[in-house]
Every structure is written in C-alpha cells, then in structure tokens.
Amino acid sequence: MNETSPTLVVDLGSLGLDDGGTVLLGLALRGVAPGSCVRVVGTREELAIHGAAWCRARGHRLLTSAGPGLAFVVGTADRARWQHARRAGHASRERDGAIARQADPQWGLAARGALVEAGVAPLAFALSDLDELWTDDVPQLYAQAAAAQWDPNTAIPWDCPLTHPGVVEDAIVQIMTYLVENETAALLVPARFLAQIHPHFREVMQLIAIQCADEARHIEVFTRRACLHSQELGTSSAGGQASLRTLVEEPDFAVAMFLLSVLGEGSFLALLWFLHEYAPDEATRAVCRLAAQDEARHVAFGLGHLARHLGMDPGLRPRLIAAVERRHDALAHTAGLNADVFDALVLVAAGEVAPAEIARGWAAVVELEREMDRGRRRRLARLGFDEDSARALSELHTKNFM
Amino acid sequence: MTNDTVLLGAVAYDPKVVTIWEGFRAFFADHGLDFDAVLFTNYERQVAAHLRGDFDVAWNSPLAWLQLERVAAKLGRRACAIAMRDSDRDLTSVIVTRASDGPSDLEGLRGQTIAVGAADSPQATLIPLEHLRAAGLKPGRDVEVRRFDVLVGKHGDHIGGERDAARALIAGEVAAACMIDGNHLLFAREGVLPTGSTRILAQTAPYDHCNFSVLDDAADRPAMRRFVELLLGMSYADPTVRPLMDLEGLKAWQPGRTEGYAQLARAIDAFGTIDGFVALQLARLRR
C-alpha cells in the first residue's frame, strides 16, 4: 500500500458531504487503520471542496482534492478518542461482570454497557455501592410495576352512587386528607434519594422512579375521592406532620427506606385493605385496592434490598434499631395519630352512628392496629430480627402508622 | 515575565477561551512548565502589548500575525511563528450563490451585492474580496460589499458574521456570500444553507490561519522551546487535553509556517487594511 494506491475507494454516488455523505464515509472507515489511503469519488460538484474541509476537521491528511473527488490518509484522531475508553459493565444482567460492585463516577450518566470515553468529568452519586441498593428481585419488581400502571381516570368508578350517611362521607374525606399527606411523604422520601443513585443500577433507579409515580397517582386519586361530594378537605395535625417530617428529613438511604417501606408502608398495607373492606362505596374501595397493590411492591423492594444489605453489612442492623429508637424519642412528646383520623376510621368501620355499630367500628380499628403490629413483626422477622427485637421495634413505631 | 515562565496573550472571542487556556495552563503545569495567559478583547491591543513586551507569545489570527510581522520588520525586529493547529493549514474560502437564481460565474456578480463577514475577517472578507479583485471585480466599484460586522477586532474568529452573510444570501438580500469552506458544510448541517440551495461560484487558493507568534529571539529561550515541545507532543489520545483540543478545534499541533499568509498579505496591501494600525504602532514605539 502507498499513497497513490488507495486501500479503500468510497463511492458516494450523488450523495454530498452536506446531506449524509459523511455517514457513509464514517461507515466505510470503520476498522480502517490510520495511515491507510482512501479515495472518495462521487458526482457532487462540491465534493472535493467539502472533502478537504472534512479531512481538516477530522485530522485526516489530504492528498488530492480535485476532479471527481479526493484522496486522503486516515489520521489517528478517531482511534485515539476511544483508545482509553472503558465499557460501563454490560446491559444484560446475565453477563459476568455486567453490574459492578462499585459504580465508577466517570461513567456518569452513560447507559450500563456503553463504551465510555476517557475523560468524562466524574459525576458523584452518593449511592453507588451495589450492596446498598441491589436485590435480585429488582428487575422483576420493575417489570411488575411497569405492567401494573393504571389510569386514575378509568380505573376508578368515579360516578358510582354514594348512599351512605353524610357523617360517614365526612369521615372518608378526613381519611383521604390523611392519606394524601402520608403519600406525599412516601413520594418525597424516595424522590430525594432517586437523584443520588448511580444510573449504573438502572433497574433500581427505574423502580424508585415508578414508585414515585405510584405515589403521585395515589395523591391524585385520594384527593379526587375526597372531593367527590365535599368542597373542603379534613384536618392535618401537628403530631402527624411531626412524624412524617422525621421520615422526610432522614438522610440515610437504608434507614429511610426501612422506616418508610418496611415499617410505614407495611402498616399502610393493613390500613388500605381495612378501608377496602369497610369502604361505603365502590370508588373508595377501588382507590384503596389499587393503592394497596402498588404499596405491596414498595414494601417488597424495601424488604429485598434491606435483607441483602443486612447480610453484607453487619453494622446496618444496629443503625436501623437506633433509628427507630431515635425516631420514637423525637416523637415522644407529640400527639401521634390525628384524633380526627382515628374517629373517622371508627365511623367508616361502623357505617352509621348507632351505638352498637360504633362499638363494632371501634373494635375493628383496635384490631386494625393489632394487625399492623403483627405485620411489622412479620416483616422484621424476615429481615432477621429475633422475636423480642421485632416486638420492641414494632411497639416503638410511630402511632401515625406511616 | 521571568526566564522560566511562558506568558501567552490571547483574544477572548468567546467564553470558551477561558476554559481552553485554563485547561492548557494545568496541562503545562503538570509537565513542569510555568505557563499563564492574559486575555485581550481585540487583536490590535494584543499586538500592541506584544510589541511592548508585555507577554512572551501570542495566539494570533492571521491578520494579527501580519500586523505583528510588519511593525516588527519596520523596527528591525523579527517575528516568528512557532506552532499552529493542524486545522490552521490549507483552508480555503468559498464564494457562494443561490442555486436557483444566482449567477453562473464570478463575472455575473458585476454590479451585484456580495455579503461578507466582519471587516477584519481574513476568511470571510479580506481573502474572498482579494480573490474577486484578482478576478477583475474591484470591491466597491464593480461589486457592492455588504459587511456583517460581528465583533470587529476579533478578526472573524466569531463566525456570527459569516452566518449572517449566509442568511442574507438565502433571504435574497445579496447575490453571493463568502465563508470558509468548512462553514459551508456547517451551515448546511445547521439548516442556515439548506442542502442544494446554494452553489459554489469560486474557491480561493489555500491559506493558513492562526499561529503562536513570538518576537526576536524568544523562540530560543529554554522555556519557549519546552512550550513548543510540549505542544507538539500533546496527544489527542490524552483524555485530559482532548476536550480542550476539541474546543480549540484541532487534532494535533504542528510546527509554525508563514508561507500560507501570502494571499492575505496581498489583500491587506490592496485594501490598506492595516496601514493605519502599523503607522500608529510605529509612531508610539518610536516615540
């Protein structure tokens, strides 16, 4: 090979470098070694002029640019750009080494599996350790979540008849007001951590993003249910907000997800199924059922990644215990659950204001709180807490349920 | 200035200039060379400061190079181009018309209006107008010149003037427009000159663009030799400098050469472009 006998001839035909010829040239040059001589021919009048400018910009050495085309010697720049590039794992989880234990800040926002040019300015993500984030269920949970998305407009029978007494409707409004407040916390807590997760763990990022979207939908349907027949919402108590504030302000991902998903949303599962059982109308029943199905996934992810994390990091368990105790102490001088909410739950379970029904409703709410406690202890046991620890931690959980 | 420092003068034609020279400063520091830069808003002030000895080496436009070289020569001093980008070599400019209704040759521009870039742009004004003059079309007499004076003093480094000239062509305001060959491609991609909407009437002879310029025996100083050595050794494969090279538009640094400025020299002789500047500097420096 020498400079007068090209190793490659590229015929662009009627295509110019100003309407796509550079794409064909790029394809043709793939794998062509620097130093090779390339001739480009075509019928476009400006080919030689544009070709010379293109060579200059790409670092190729022009030999001739006249007549029907140009000839050039392939430069080193295209190859040099990728010389120190590294693959950011692999897109497929099945491949060995697909997911790194520690994601590299220099991978930045690159897709997992992309070939990343060296020199990317590091993008620091606080959560970049596999052990802090991963559970093998994540892909499956994400797939379930993506498939289970429902349309608030069509999934709820908003025009169902409401035949229950006004006082029960007022109770529903109060409960929905409370649910909106709690679901707002359940949206903000994962949302705060979402931007801290290294995108290398994309399944976790996607799952938490969809969890936020779930909560956004819950906020919508609870609000819409509250407003079906009411102009005004119910009350928001200082004690309830104090409890949620300790969640929203928790800076540690594992602790926050433990308090929110395992203890809080776990308790809410029981609450939502309780409301589904005693709902006085089909719309309330539907919003509670759909929200409970979503919350079950949130709880499953919390349990899954915390179980794995606890197995990897022996220091995590005492941190979780200390967090529950700290939260309990912080809330010791607050009122806990909004009294209006407790009364509203009794009224909804009673269905009417006759004393016998109220007593039945009261008993049902007391049983609900017992069921919440049993659920928390079951989930704590799944995380490896012994029976005494689980009982103690469950008792210390906030009276605000979430 | 000290003997082991290299102080550069550069014109801030764009905010990215700060990024570029700050980045190169770090590169040179990593290689043990004390390098720094002073920025000017225009090449005339930079050339004057260079002649006064305010810094060691200038990153000069081709016009600034000729300004420096000519004043230096009249003072019995010597200017030298020590390095340039690979992309500074063998540029051409093109004179472009509308494909639909433009003239078929340069002669067809007689009596018409031609759009150019800033008054001091070698590539979009001076060299294309010299090409026309050499072809028998005297600017101002045989063709009317409409200038798009974006950031005069920056010698056309800012391509806004070229782009505005291209827009005027497409808008039917002028019969032809002047630009660097590469910008004819760029403007097609940007949609300013849609593919097929224009035809190249003429292409100038090749010319060179920017260079690092020094005066007298500055090139022989050890620090300056090291500066050139590090420049020429800079590799596009090095991820620490590649973004800077991309910003500055090069793949490799090359040794300086001055043969490529003859065409521009003929243009400024014909149009008297820098006569006033040269006279003013001589008067000041001889005072």
Image (cartoon, rainbow, N blue to C red):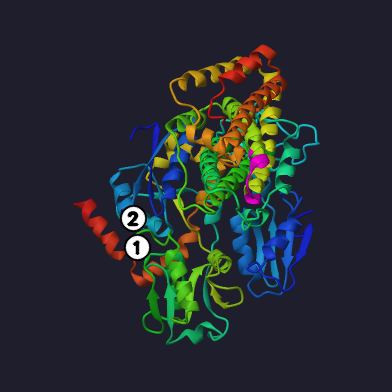
Residue B152's mark? 1
Task: Please give the chain letter of the residue carrying mark 1.
Answer: B
Residue A138 sits in quarter: top right
Q: Is residue A276 magenta?
A: yes
B152 relative position to A400: left or right: left
Quadrant containing the C terminus of chain A is top right
A74 relative position to A253: left or right: right
Q: Residues within 10 Å of mark 1 (few under 14, many from 20)?
A: some
Q: Residue at x 63, y 72 (%)?
A: A46
A295 relative position to A185: left or right: right
The percent coordinates of residue B182 (x first, y second) are: 56, 64
The percent coordinates of residue B36 (x first, y second) are: 39, 38
Residue B88's mark? none
The percent coordinates of residue B42 (x first, y second) are: 33, 55
Is residue B6 something that shows in the picture?
yes
Mark 1 and mark 2 in contact? Answer it, CB < 8 Å: yes
Residue B110 sits in quarter: bottom left
Q: Say which element carries label 2.
A: loop
Q: Residue furthest front?
A: A355
Q: CA distance from mark 1 to mark 2?
A: 8 Å
**Start-end of magenta stretch:** A275-283
What secondary structure do most residues of the magenta stretch adopt? helix
**Amino acid type, callout 1:** Val
Q: Say which element carries label 1.
A: loop
The percent coordinates of residue B169 (x first, y second) are: 48, 78
Q: Residues within 10 Å of mark 2 (few under 14, many from 20)?
A: some
Residue with the mark numbered 2: B42
In the rendered view, tell whether residue A314 sits above or below residue A231: above
Q: Residue at x 45, y 40 (%)?
A: A235
In the rendered view, tell whether residue A314 sits above or below residue A88: above
In the rendered view, tell whether residue A153 sits above or below residue A357: below
Question: Which badge, 1 or 2, is on the more N-terminal residue?
Answer: 2
